[in-house]
Image (cartoon, grey):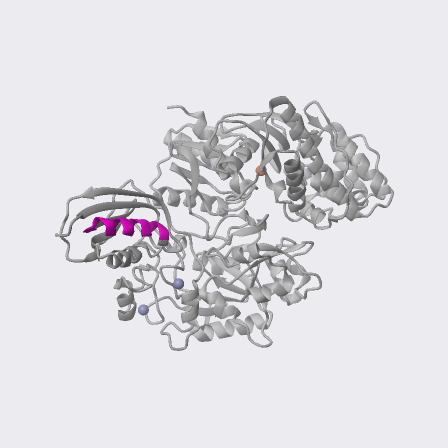
């Protein structure tokens, strides 16, 4: 026996299943002349090796160094054990231990190897729309249960053919134990149907779908995590048809093009944006639109940017493959009616989308979990998430400390929920606006699925303070049914905490929170949204807020910026000319009702919302009077900003109140002097950035705090974010912004878990 011959047991935790980890270990062990075995367990991967001590050390070092691209190693624990005298190195069957959990890989875009094979005429998977390997393909969307093995995925119904079986069992093959492995002989197939008629299959179905897209038809395409609605983005009639059938009047559509070169014709792409577009996640990236491009205006009305993604499934490549005369850019919007969650079950999709789509490009691989496309942008060279879903969820977010097992139910709009286990937060995929039965249902089944996948039994439940959110109602019901403590978390406190966790903040030290958003219930029952907080994970105080102003009609005001503008002017006691845009937009009766509403305080809850202030300014200067989606007036106001405008409005504060009246006066004054909209909009943005810094300086003089967390939906405004950060840094502050979760309400549940955890001490 060699000197130093020994046995070692190694346990690895992290994303190590479904990412080609065992074949990687197998080959590594052989390279280092080690014998033993590797297997998946419910908590990660376990390895036993026999060999020379120095070889084992090199083997362990290389595990961390050369792990497969989709793997993430959280911990490696080793232990010396007696030598076992194995003949070889083998891969053992999975071991199931109840109660343990292993992180699950998100769905990943098709890898370059599979892409090459798919377009290789000699390959047996030539033009096969479900080609995948251990480095790519569906994961989260097809997993029914753990451990991640084929019988527990929606691929269970497809038995492997001889060739696939050989690849699946060969540790030297790229498809070794790739659970979704399939080929034209044994795997899922596509077909095209319309009006209940089966029109074509396989390659013919793809060719006919292309012809339909070319002809301006709207196609429902069953994809990775749900259905898309697709059409030619340069065809105005097709785009307008899609808008009217989908009942989505202005909200921008996501676009897909075959290659970066095509996208570059329409948008500016920085190196960081290119990296994000081509990353394994393949999210939608918001890119600056080039001037004079030839897409249908209806694709993204009033926007200065376009949301593009690259093909991320093999089917996308086949569908969009360039050809002379064939369209280059396609609308790829989620397959739903406005407001409803994206469809992902075949029958239901056909039922719900038949009034929208001319045809359905179907396939028989079931989707277990619906997952929407992620939406991102690049800010200062790094990811700035807007919707964290496909490719990212359910990857866990590291927490600064180990937490109780908590379920946080999030807010209402852009809902996500969050479950915790030890120091990991499992933030859900994007659920959507919890405003109807379908979305609520998807929220509830999502929670059950996550609890099961990650073996989490919540010890307490956290919810927003707002009693009427469906997520809060669910939390109350569940906490009563399960006799669990329920912790109500103030919305803006949750934003602040979310920004801190996002930045790995691990202390009890307080920070300044610039929490600017549209809506969140305050401690005093006022609708908050323009809040400057001082706080940490445990508690917060509200140091500054915008003036309280009346919101005519309450929540419905979101759709009526014109009414907000006039209500703010009237409540501030300001006279406005009859020629002001919102005054001409609303008819005499509407204005009379509004006046009386304000005067008698009828259905005019008070708000300090920053989002609504943007709506009011947008309407005042004639940008947008009626909005069809939340934030539209603000987005269009930002879109016209002029970077060369140096002036700023003065926004004073008195005690704890930021005064809006002087701001409205300056805007009225400029408007009356025919100052262009672009200048007014920019002066407003500049004024808010300066105000933010003045407020922080005031707090610093009182508390010496220098860290500033920027959270809330308003920080999706890149102009305001850029200007505010520059001033904060110039004044020596340490600003924190979101990097892993959205700054909008999609990040709320992550903040809720941290705050709830501090509330219990048992
Ligand atoms: Zn692949
Ligand atoms: Zn096969
Ligand atoms: Fe919010």
170 lies left or right of 468:
left
Using the rendered image of the protein, determine whether residue 491 is visible from the camera's viewpoint. yes
Can you give x and y, in whole percent of width and height, for residue 268 in the image? 63, 59
Residue 276 forms part of the magenta stretch: no
In the displayed structure, does residue 462 sit left or right of residue 255? Answer: left
- Residue 542 falls left or right of residue 638: left
Work out whether residue 758 or residue 745 is closer to the camera in this orientation and state it: 758
Q: Which residues are magenta?
A: 50-65
Residue found at the very far right of the displayed protein: 673
Most common secondary structure along the magenta stretch: helix
Query: Is 55 included in the stretch rendered in magenta?
Result: yes
Could you say where residue 570 lies in the image, as x and y percent from the top left?
A: 78, 33
Count of numbered badges drawn on the protein: 0
Pick whichever, 415 or 471, lies toward us: 415
Q: Is residue 543 above or below residue 612?
A: above
Q: Left or right of 638: which side holds 478?
A: left
């Amino acid at each position: 026996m060699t000197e130093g011959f020994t046995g070692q047991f190694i346990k690895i935790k992290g994303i190590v299943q479904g990412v080609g980890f065992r074949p990687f270990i197998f080959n590594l062990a052989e390279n280092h002349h080690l014998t033993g075995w590797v297997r998946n367990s419910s908590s990660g991967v376990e390895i036993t090796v026999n060999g020379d001590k120095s070889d084992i050390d090199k083997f362990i070092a290389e595990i961390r160094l050369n792990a497969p691209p989709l793997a993430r190693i959280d911990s490696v624990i080793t232990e010396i054990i007696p030598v076992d005298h194995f003949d070889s190195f083998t891969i053992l069957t999975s071991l199931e231990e109840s109660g343990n959990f292993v992180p699950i890989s998100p769905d990943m875009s098709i890898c370059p190897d599979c892409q090459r094979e798919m377009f290789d005429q000699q390959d047996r998977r030539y033009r096969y729309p479900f080609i995948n390997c251990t480095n790519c393909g569906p994961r989260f969307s097809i997993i029914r249960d753990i451990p991640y093995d084929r019988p527990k995925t929606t691929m269970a119904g497809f038995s492997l053919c001889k060739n696939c079986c050989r690849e699946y069992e060969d540790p030297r093959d790229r498809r070794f134990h790739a659970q979704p492995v399939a080929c034209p002989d044994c795997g899922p197939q596509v077909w095209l149907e319309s009006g209940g008629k089966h029109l074509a299959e396989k390659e013919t179905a793809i060719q006919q779908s292309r012809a339909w897209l070319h002809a301006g038809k709207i196609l429902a395409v069953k994809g990775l995590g749900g259905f898309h609605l697709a059409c030619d983005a340069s065809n105005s009639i097709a785009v307008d048809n899609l808008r009217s059938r989908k009942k989505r009047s202005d909200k921008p559509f996501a676009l897909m093009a075959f290659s970066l070169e095509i996208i570059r014709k329409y948008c500016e792409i920085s190196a960081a944006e290119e990296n994000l577009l081509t990353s394994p996640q393949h999210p939608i990236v918001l890119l600056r639109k080039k001037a004079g491009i030839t897409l249908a205006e209806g694709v993204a009305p009033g926007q200065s940017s376009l949301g593009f993604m690259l093909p991320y499934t093999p089917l996308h490549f086949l569908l969009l493959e360039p050809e002379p005369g064939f369209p280059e850019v396609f609308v790829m919007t989620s397959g739903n009616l406005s407001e409803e969650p994206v469809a992902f079950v075949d029958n239901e999709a056909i039922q719900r989308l038949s009034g929208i789509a001319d045809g359905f490009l179907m396939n028989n691989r079931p989707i277990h979990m619906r997952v929407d496309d992620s939406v991102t942008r690049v800010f200062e060279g790094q990811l700035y998430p807007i919707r964290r879903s496909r490719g990212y969820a359910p990857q866990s977010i590291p927490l600064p400390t180990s937490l109780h097992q908590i379920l946080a139910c999030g807010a209402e709009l852009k809902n996500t929920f969050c479950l915790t286990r030890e120091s990991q937060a499992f933030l859900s995929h994007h659920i959507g606006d919890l405003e109807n039965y379908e979305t609520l249902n998807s929220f509830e089944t999502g929670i059950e699925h996550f609890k099961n996948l990650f073996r989490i039994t919540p010890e307490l439940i956290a919810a927003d303070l707002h009693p009427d959110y469906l997520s809060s109602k669910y939390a109350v019901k569940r906490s009563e049914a399960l006799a669990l403590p329920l912790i109500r978390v103030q919305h803006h406190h949750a934003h602040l905490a979310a920004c801190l966790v996002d930045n790995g903040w691990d202390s009890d030290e307080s920070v300044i929170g610039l929490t600017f958003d549209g809506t969140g219930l305050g401690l005093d029952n006022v609708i908050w949204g323009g809040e400057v907080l001082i706080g940490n994970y445990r508690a917060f105080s509200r140091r500054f807020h915008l003036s309280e102003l009346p919101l005519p009609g309450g929540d419905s005001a979101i759709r009526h910026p014109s009414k907000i503008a006039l209500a703010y002017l009237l409540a501030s006691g300001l006279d406005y000319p009859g020629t002001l845009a919102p005054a001409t937009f609303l008819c005499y009766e509407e204005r009379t009702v509004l006046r009386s509403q304000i005067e008698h305080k009828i259905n005019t809850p008070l708000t300090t919302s920053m989002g609504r202030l943007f709506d009011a300014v947008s309407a005042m200067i004639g940008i947008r009077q009626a909005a069809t989606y939340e934030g539209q007036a603000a987005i269009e106001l930002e879109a016209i900003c002029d970077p060369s405008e140096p002036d700023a409005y003065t926004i004073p504060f008195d005690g704890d109140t930021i005064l809006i009246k002087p701001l409205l006066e300056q805007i009225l004054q400029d408007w009356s002097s025919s100052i262009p909209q672009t200048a007014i909009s920019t002066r407003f943005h500049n004024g808010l950035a300066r105000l933010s810094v003045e407020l922080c300086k005031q707090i610093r003089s009182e508390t010496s705090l220098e860290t500033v967390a920027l959270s809330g939906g308003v920080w999706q405004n890149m102009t305001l974010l850029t200007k505010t950060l520059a001033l904060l840094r110039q004044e020596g502050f340490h600003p924190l912004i979101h990097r892993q979760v959205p700054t909008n309400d999609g990040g709320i549940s992550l903040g809720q878990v941290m705050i709830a955890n501090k509330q219990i001490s048992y």
